[in-house]
Amino acid sequence: MPSSPPPGTSIVQSTTGRGRCLQATRRFPAGSLIGIFNNPLLALPDGPSMRTTCNYCLRVGNGHITMKACTGCKATVYCNAACQRAHWKSGVHKAECKMFSRIRETTGKEWLPTPVRAVAQILILLQTGDPTMTKAFSSTEGLEGNVEGFKRNKEVWADYELQAMAAVVYGGLLQSEEMMHKAKEILCKIQTNAFNRLDADTGTAGIFLDSVLAMVNHSCVPNAFVGFDKRTAMLRAERDIEVGEEIEISYCDYTTPRAARRETLKLYHFQCNCLRCRDDLDVYQVCAISPNISLNKFSLQPNLSKLRNPQIDRSGVSSTDVETISRKWHLLSRQDNIDVMQLARQRWSLCKPLVEAKMFAVEPVPTSILNFAILCQSDSNKTAYALPLACFLSTECEPVKLVAPFLPWRVKGLMMVAKLLGHLGELRATGELVRSCSHKALVDILTKSDQVSMCEAVLRLVVHYGSMGASDDWDVLREARDTLGEIESLQGREKESYFLRTWANDSQDPEGNAFFQNAVLKPINDLAALTIGIMDSELGDRRSVARR
Ligand SMILES: C[S@@+](CC[C@H](N)C(=O)[O-])C[C@H]1O[C@@H](n2cnc3c(N)ncnc32)[C@H](O)[C@@H]1O
């Protein structure tokens, strides 16, 4: 059924009862590109965002990109004429245009919920005899749908009945039993195989379905990951993949506790039997045996022995405790009328046993710190706190959770550090830092350190890893390159830039490395060391401890 797999891979029947799978027929080193998928079966923006996101390339509209609506249906929008033409030529909008015009005329609606639109789109294309769709959605050899599994869940099935009915009605299709059955089968196949393109930073949301990418099975210790750039998905190696190995990605956030992963994986109707699940390993245990540890020689956590032998004390926190903390942490947001600071305090209080055990990389500790860092950024009296918190995440949490330094989330964390260094460097230069920040130790570190060199080093990491983790065209990478260019052109910093360039070319170069250790890593670690004190004083019982 699937179209051709990328060179160096093949689709075979798995020997462990997981249906078909994608297998490597050549070696893929960590960070290398396995395949590009730019001709998906489905690529849809999420529900209402179809009015603000290009319906072909999925670029999000902003101040620079103005979307133009299709003059026919007035429902879909495009960032340029080429995208509009391509959408029409692919047959997709030709099929949808009439549907959206009719919906607007009869109901006044301008958009459809994503799954309803997806199913209607596929059903209409199937009616036109589209060969790719016919192959992919064939009941016998097409995509896996786990239909019987979904049927057993009465609540989900009832929901699918409603969505299927909506797709058939809005699609203007014959409301036969056969059509309804097909619509539900398509929903199951989408649920099983499509990617949810959720990106909080760009506001991107929607679904992406490719018949070859859909052959990649799951592991919570995956050897590959998928990144998106507009209408294109890229499959990359998360660690070295050898010839004959099955390529596996994670269908869930593998850093969450096993119970949460199992809950997410219920939608896929299998029990994961990977090492992380089988032995219920925490992120420190998985990190300690990761083949990716040595890649961190060039990172903000180059102390590899810390990753191999973390100084944590697991004796007081069982994996059941972690699951309970995580569950309660998520439930807290369901309280009525709770303000963000109250929520942050309650959540930090739940993290206490993990913090005492120094298990800082175990969720929900990192997310609690990140959320508070984001809150601090919008409060002028607390802005400076965001920097130590971001440094802590990049040195103590992310390298353990996501051992490969090129993973997009790690690169984004570095970019947060770089931006905060730039911002606080400016506040320091104008004297505003001393006026607005009462945390003496924090002000001292910033006064004695060279934020421009720290920022340059962090940006060099972003530039080095950005294209391995996402694409050369990634917004984060472009911004890092621009800022690095500005820093490099500053007068009077030739020596510092020389050392940092030397370190970036060879992180073990004695001169370059010594400069990095003293001028960059030491102040970053000193800043990071303030984090728990800041969190406790701002969100705990011990108020104002951080103001010593
Ligand atoms: C996206 S499809 C992957 C391709 C699928 N194996 C096929 O033959 O079409 C997802 C489905 O594959 C199976 N699968 C994926 N990962 C698995 C795993 N680790 N163990 C068992 N089954 C798995 C499950 O049936 C899951 O719903």
Image (tube, rainbow, N blue to C red):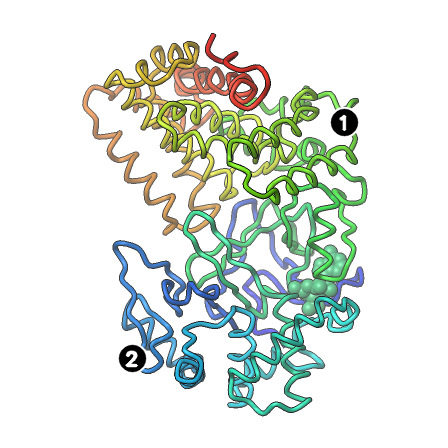
The image shows residue 502 at horizontal and vertical percentages of: 37, 25
Q: Is residue 548 above or below residue 503?
A: above
- Residue at 39% in and 39% down: 463
Mark 1 — residue? 317
Which type of secondary structure does the marked residue at label 1 adopt? loop
- Residue at 40% in and 69% down: 55
The image shows residue 161 at horizontal and vertical percentages of: 67, 76
Direction left: furthest residue: 491
- Residue at 65% in and 37% down: 329
Q: Does the residue tagged 2 have its C-beta within 8 Å of any atom of ligand 1? A: no
The image shows residue 545 at horizontal and vertical percentages of: 52, 11
Disc 2 packing (10 Å; few <14; some 14–19; many ≥20):
few
Cα distance, mark 2 to mark 1? 60 Å
If the image is split into quadrants, where does the N terminus sit?
bottom right
Mark 2 — residue? 71
Indicate the quadrant where residue 182 lies: bottom right
